[in-house]
Image (tube, rainbow, N blue to C red):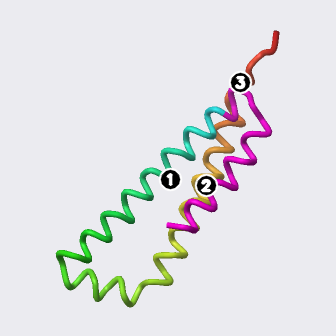
Amino acid sequence: MVTTDTLNGFTMSKLIYRADRRAAIASRIMSVAVALLSLLVAGMGLAKLYLPVVEETLKDLGLTVGVAVVVAMVAAFVLAMRVAKSAPAAQEG
């Protein structure tokens, strides 16, 4: 969770430098990605409480799950940048 929040903070700080329509679109995509990933992690935590087989499986896959979280956030960042790049920029004035 700390990794996800750190990565989210880093990407949001990069987006703040570009305060236009593209940045708003990218920010929304990243926020949705963080929210979905947080819900997924919470769901895994609940599953561990109620299903012993899930707890055993996740115990063996701890590092893999952590790497998957980081990869998912990087993929969301790349997607957000591509979608934002294709969006028209806001006109000043």
* Residue 12 image position (x, y, % from top left): 67, 47
Location of mark 3 (residue): 88
Query: Compared to 48, does 85 lie above or below?
Result: above
Which mark sits nearer the N-terminus, 3 or 2?
A: 2
**Vertical order, 85 against 9 (above or below):** above
Q: Which residue is mark 1?
A: 34
Q: Is residue 82 left or right of residue 67?
A: right
Q: x%, y% of residue 16?
A: 74, 39
Query: Split into 4 quadrants, where in the image is the C terminus?
Result: top right
Q: Nearer the viewer, mark 3 or mark 1?
A: 1
The amino acid type found where label 2 is placed reads Asn
Q: Which residue is mark 2?
A: 8
Residue 49 lies left or right of residue 34; in this view the side is: left
Viewer-nearest of labels 3 and 2? Answer: 2
Magenta stretch, residue numbers: 1-23
Residue 4's x, y, as percent? Answer: 55, 63
Left or right: where 12 falls relative to 48: right
Lower position in the chain sequence, tag 3 or tag 1: 1
